């Protein structure tokens, strides 16, 4: 199953555009997880919910990899601790 994750960190970024891209790619709205928070915070409830829901064989789709964390280390840490 494909699951989408989108994060915006400022009010100037467009979350709706990212969600539209996921739905256009065939990902159902109830399988799209979002966060409206800076990547500087480790508190990302949308990402936590996504990782809790994902099962073996699921594919997590992101608009860009930098939406998962502030840097590579942060991204790897969040994927192994959540």
Image (tube, rainbow, N blue to C red):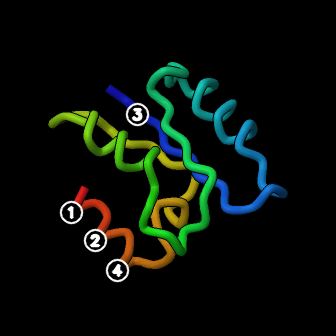
Q: Marks 3 and 4, Cα distance to the nearest angstrom? A: 22 Å
Q: Distance between the residues labelled 4 and 1?
A: 11 Å
Q: Are marks 3 and 4 in contact (CB under 8 Å)?
A: no
Q: Mark 3 or mark 1, which is nearer the start of the sequence?
A: 3
User: Residue at label 2?
Assistant: 77
Q: Is residue 40 left or right of residue 49?
A: right
**Is residue 57 depicted above or below 80 in this figure?**
above
Pointer 2 with pointer 4, Cβ within 8 A: yes
**Real-space Cα distance between discs 1 and 2?**
5 Å
Identified at 56% across, 28% down, the residue is 25
Mark 3 or mark 2: whose residue is earlier in sequence = 3
First in residue order: circle 3 vs circle 4: 3
CB atoms of marks 3 and 2 within 8 Å: no
Q: Which residue is at the far right?
A: 12
Q: Nearer the viewer, mark 1 or mark 3?
A: 1
Q: Residue 73 bears which disc, if any?
A: 4
Residue nearest the viewer, comparing 34 with 24: 34
Q: Residues within 10 Å of mark 1 (few under 14, many from 20)?
A: few
| Residue drawn at x 44%, y 48% as measured from the top left | 45
Work out whether mark 4 precedes mark 1 in sequence or the reverse, and give the earlier one.
4
Q: Do the residues labelled 1 and 2 touch (CB within 8 Å)?
A: yes
> Dots 4 and 1: beta carbons under 8 Å?
no
What residue sits right under mark 1 in the picture? 80
Which residue is at the far left?
A: 56
Residue 51: % across, % down: 30, 45
Q: Where is residue 20 in the image (x, y as percent from the top left)?
A: 69, 30
Nearest to viewer (mark 3 / mark 2)? 2
> Residue 7: x, y in percent?
59, 52
Distance, label 1 to label 3, CA atoms, is 18 Å
Of helix, strand and loop, which one carries label 2? helix
Tell me, for residue 31, which label it has, or none: none
As drawn, the label of residue 3 is: 3
């Amino acid at each position: 199953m494909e699951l989408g994750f989108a994060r915006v960190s400022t009010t100037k970024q467009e979350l709706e555009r990212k969600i539209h891209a996921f739905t256009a790619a065939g990902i159902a709205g109830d399988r799209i997880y979002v966060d409206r928070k800076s990547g500087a915070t480790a508190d990302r409830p949308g990402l936590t919910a996504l990782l809790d829901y994902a099962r073996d064989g699921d594919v997590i789709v992101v608009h860009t990899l930098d939406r998962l964390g502030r840097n590579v280390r942060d991204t790897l840490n969040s994927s192994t601790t959540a």
